[in-house]
Image: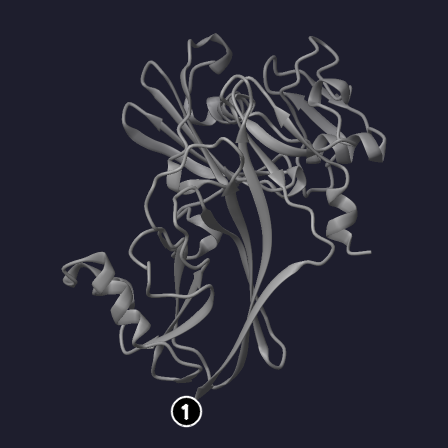
Amino acid sequence: MNPKITVALFIAALVSKTGVALALTSFPSASKLNIVCPLDGSPYVWTPVGSKSENFIWVCLECGHHWQVTYPEDSYRSWLDVFLDPAFVRDYTVLYLRKELDLPDPLKLNWIGGRQTPERYLGYETYVFKAKDLSVTIGYPVVLPQNTVYRIKIEDGGRIVWEGQLHRRRFLTSELPSQNNLRTVYDYYGGVGVFKKGIHVIATSYDPLTLKKEFQTVNDFWQALKEKETTRASSKDFVSIIISRGDYPTGGHAIQIKSFSWLESYPVKLRFEANFTDPGEGVYVTEAFTNPLVLIPLGRLSPGLYTVEVHVDTYILTFDAQGKPVYTLLLTFREELWTQTFVVID
């Protein structure tokens, strides 16, 4: 059986006070894992993930207590993989950085704010919290808990003091944070009637983003790229990929690239993982034609044969009684996979 299907059978939507995520029912909440500070019971505990001291040397980020213990493997893995509520991520990150950056205790601040996800970013959640001069922005794709990468920006007095990521309890500094380390340009209206559903390979003599402002309308920009679509590019061309869901009669449909990998093989594989989101029953949508698409400029490629793969997860968006979004993974018996092959010549 397809592993994705097996996993999906255990999926349930968890709705917290401040956010929504998908979680496996086998994953207990952080409070049930018993990995808390033995001194004061705080859940804001940390171990140096990725080092020899992982799951051995522990510190409570709230009270500063240190201890040494190795927790059972299943409990520790569940602690690593559990979905973290955005408000928890906010406090966890500030507590982790407060000594280094001279930040206040986040647990003593009166935070305001919450979910700020724009309509066009269905499938990717954004939260903004503010307290006094401190502002914390958190974004993450709607994926399984163990795959969730929280992108975090902390501002103090209007100045960015830290940007980075939190993945499976590991903090990673990011000097130039960007989704999947790719330049991605999303649009929902400009490609209507231009790009059909599928993968489109674009070959231009320039980086398309450098000339975008020269077009009078967004539609002109997409039409100009459509005219450069090909399956046979030159090594002197600037190659871009456009992934389009095709035309829809209403809004509410979204696309989000969640990861990218380059696999050296023959042909070379350009692998994308994408989230598609569709509105569920009763969800308000705009009455306008849309074409959810994303432009991914790659650059000049070496001669050879290339295959673009797009691995698709589709979610249905609904809202609970409190107005919180609930994303439900659409179960399929076969993975949805899009492919397109092209060649680059000298």
**Element carrying mark 1:** loop
Q: Residue tagged by mark 1?
A: 346
Residue 327, quarter of picture = top right
Type of the residue with mark 1: Asp
Write the residue at 77% across / 56% down. 2
Name the spot of residue 259 as percent of width and height, x first: 54, 54
Residue 158, quarter of picture = top left
Question: Camera-side residue: 58 or 153?
Answer: 153
Give the side of residue 300 with respect to residue 159, left or right. Answer: right
Q: What colour scheme has been applied to the protein in the rendered image?
A: one colour
Write the residue at 49% across / 24% down. 90
Q: Is residue 42 above or below residue 245?
A: above
Residue 271 seen by the camera: yes
Question: Camera-side residue: 57 or 259?
Answer: 259
Question: Camera-side residue: 77 or 233?
Answer: 233
Name the spot of residue 179 as percent of width and height, x first: 45, 49
Which image quarter holds the C terminus?
bottom left
Name the spot of residue 276 as percent of width and height, x first: 52, 49
Give the side of residue 311 with respect to residue 184, left or right. Answer: right
Give the side of residue 63 with respect to residue 206, left or right. Answer: right
Which image quarter holds the N terminus?
bottom right
Residue 36, quarter of picture = top right
Name the spot of residue 205 as percent of width and height, x first: 27, 78
